[in-house]
Image (cartoon, rainbow, N blue to C red):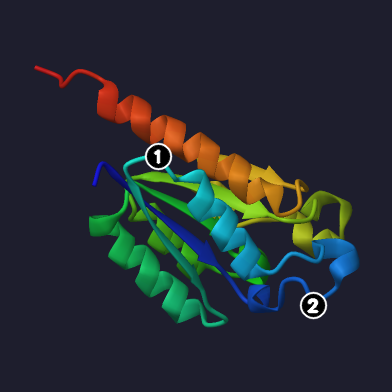
Amino acid sequence: MAGSIYILNGPNLNLLGQRQPEIYGYETLADVEQSCRDMLTGHDMALRFLQSNAEHQIIDWIHEARTQADAIIINPAAFTHTSVAILDALNAFEGLVVEVHISNVHKREPFRHHSYVSGRADAVMAGFGVEGYSLALRHVVGKIARKMAAPASA
């Protein structure tokens, strides 16, 4: 396998398509996962797509990714604004990190304007709806492909 990508989803994203569809839309997390898997067709890359409402589980997956993944795409959901622990775990990951938010968090309540995760993220997608996952994945696949194609340093 040429590359490996983890897509991690935080609390309440298991309710995507049901919870506040006026903000988050009607597509489910399963729809998002299938779209991401479809995008990887023809690429030699593995995808681990995960969701948890538990902060410790997300941290454990980030720790696992340290030895298994080239990149993490993360929608930390409400943990965005509260979790120094997730930030610390991401700081221990040496690969590419892209933060995704379905809504434009900067047009929402003031407490949503600050992201701990952004302190580590190499890129941030916000306000693109679930298409933000596809944009993030396209970005990550391109970065991994370019890195793998680069000549080895002597």
Quadrant location of residue 80?
bottom right
Say what amino acid the circle numbered 2 marks: Gln
Q: Which mark is residue 42?
A: 1
- Residue drawn at (71%, 78%) of the image: 15
Residue that protrudes farthest toward the bottom in the picture: 54
Residue 151 location (% of width, % of height): 20, 18
Residue 29 location (% of width, % of height): 63, 68
Query: Between marks 2 and 1, how big is the CA–CA gap?
Result: 32 Å
Left/right of residue 65 with respect to residue 59 in the rendered view:
left
Quadrant location of the C terminus in the rendered image: top left
- Residue drawn at (40%, 39%) of the image: 42
Location of residue 121 with respect to 47 vertically, above or below:
above
Residue 146 location (% of width, % of height): 35, 25
Task: Quickly name the residue at label 2.
Answer: 18
- Secondary structure beneath label 2: loop
Nearer to me, 125 or 133: 133
Left/right of residue 120 with respect to residue 100 in the rendered view:
left
Q: Earlier in the sequence, mark 2 or mark 1?
A: 2
Nearer to me, 96 or 88: 96
One can see residue 111 in this view: yes
